[in-house]
Amino acid sequence: MYVFGSGVLIGTPSGGSPINFGLAQEVSLNIATTTKALYGQNNFPVAVGSGTRKMTGKAKLARLSGQALGNLFFGITPTTGGTQTQFGEVTSVPAVSPFTYSTTFRSTFVSDQGVIYAATGLPMKAVASSPAMGQYSVSAGVYTFSSADAGAAVLISYTYSVTGSGANIIVTSQPVGPAITFSANLFAADPTTGKQFSMLLYNCVAEKLSFGTKLEDFVVPFRVIKTVQPILFKVYSEIAQRDDSAMTEAQIDNLAQAIWRAVAHVDPALTYDEFLSFRFTVMDLFAALPPVAQASGLSLRPATSEASPEPGKSISTP
């Protein structure tokens, strides 16, 4: 049969109700077995024994579910409500006294998140009382400004509580040991026959939960630079001397390792062998190279007469 699409992933906590993880974009399952080979005087084994097995999986989801996070990862049933952020509420300092502004959600105000001038984006400084020019004070959702800022347009950010909607998960520090278990059901359909592929996993534990945001770019934090940068520099030094098509297998392997190390920072469980099993070409690796290199402190510049001998510096390319 054929399987099309990412499928549907449903988790059921022990003694709880089924929960759809929500808009699964990609689900992968891996079964690994440890083996032990017995060798004699020749280079091929005469027997292979099978040891322990484990199944691991990953799911990329496009929708955050408070029920899934709470019940399947933290073992906590979410309560209704929570804390939300009002970002950049538009107002102006009154032209005459009193120079105060009551926020839209002042009745459920939680905490101040800063004030900036709308015209310049420059932040104002929070003080306990009697603000001077460029300062403000806040109490119970009411902001007080200086008469010197009368008429100035400002943007106010703050948090406030809600009670009738949302899912609130309060995570506290607990003794180590107990694990949150749940069953999982992954199913997808064959578009040619309508038949269903289904996999039931009866005892699962969520090992890792990751959140990440980016604006159309690769994210390679500083702590991965130490491993990525030396390999990238070696790759740059090699390709600066020859055409891409003339790269040796070892040079391509260095390129693949550099990209893998950057990706593995976001997904530490990803092994190099698993990375190589993905579908990509050498040109795909080259396409990923510039943003990874830039985040690692290296950059591609127009060719000069001499390449820098020091890692971390720009080098020339043909």
Image: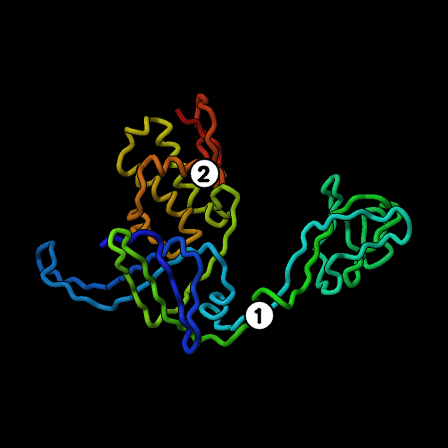
| Type of the residue with mark 1 | Ile
Residue 248: x and y in percent read 27, 34
**Most distant residue in the right direction:** 97
Residue 308: x and y in percent read 45, 30
Secondary structure beneath dot 2 equals: helix
The residue lying at 41 percent from left, 48 percent from top is 263
Q: How many badges with numbers are in the image?
A: 2
Q: Is residue 267 left or right of residue 137?
A: left
Q: CA distance from mark 2 to mark 1?
A: 39 Å
Above/below status of 263 relative to 308? below
Instruction: State the residue position of label 2.
Output: 293
Dot 1: few (<14), some (14–19), or many (≥20) neighbours within 10 Å? few
Instruction: State the residue position of label 1.
Output: 170
Dot 2: few (<14), some (14–19), or many (≥20) neighbours within 10 Å? many
Judge by depth and name the residue closer to the eye, 205 or 141: 141
The residue lying at 61 percent from left, 67 percent from top is 81
Residue 222: x and y in percent read 51, 47
